[in-house]
Amino acid sequence: MKGEEGVSTTIKVSSPAALGDAVGQRATGEWFTIAQERIDAFADATEDLQWIHVDPWRAADGPFGTTIAHGFLTLSLLPRLASSLVEVGGVAMAMNYGLDKVRFLHPVPVGSRVRATTELTGAETVAQGVRLASTVTVEIEGADKPALVAQTLALYVPEAPSPS
């Protein structure tokens, strides 16, 4: 794990059972640019065609001076922004288990660069494996507030033991 500002970091553990020892660790991802084409594609997919997202000319006179990404678009990018921040060995599969809380704190103007920072906040052994709780913050380069903060849950299912 590297700790330099702007450099991607990764939390690495050997197995789902070792996630408890990693609670409290943080990792930061790479910057990712939010292009108008992505905003338009998300608008088409969700049928959320508000002018603030898809009409650059009208948005130029709006409250942000440009189009902005949908809050749910930014949230939907968590797999892209945060999935590489935690590496767990000995996993048969890992899956999104849900969200406990999400707050959209700052609009993301088109052309902005965003990145995720994750902090592992809890690890609970359950019947299927280990449920990992994290707080993921999506930062906007140059902004004083993050785009969003989400409390996420993931389930890590360990590989079956090898028959002896």
Image: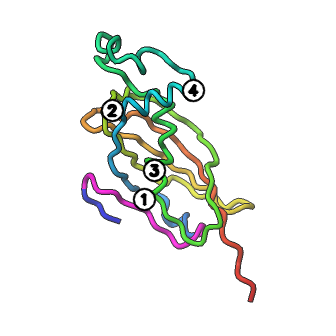
Residue occupying the point 37% across, 52% down:
29
Q: Which residue is mark 4?
A: 46
Instruction: Give the residues drawn in magenta, as a range.
Output: 5-17
**What amino acid is labelled 3 in the image?**
Ala
Q: Is residue 18 above or below residue 4?
A: below
Which one is in front, 57 or 84?
57
Left or right: residue 71 versus residue 93 is left
**What amino acid is labelled 1 in the image?**
Gln
Give the mark, 3 or 2, whose residue is nearer the N terminus.
Answer: 3
Residue occupying the point 33% across, 27% down:
109
Nearer the viewer's eye, disc 1 or disc 2?
2
What is the CA distance from the residue labelled 3 to the residue labelled 1?
A: 14 Å
What is the CA distance from the residue labelled 1 to the residue labelled 2?
A: 22 Å
Give the mark, 3 or 1, whose residue is nearer the N terminus.
Answer: 1
Q: Magenta includes 86?
A: no
Residue occupying the point 31% across, 18% down:
64
Q: Which residue is mark 3?
A: 82
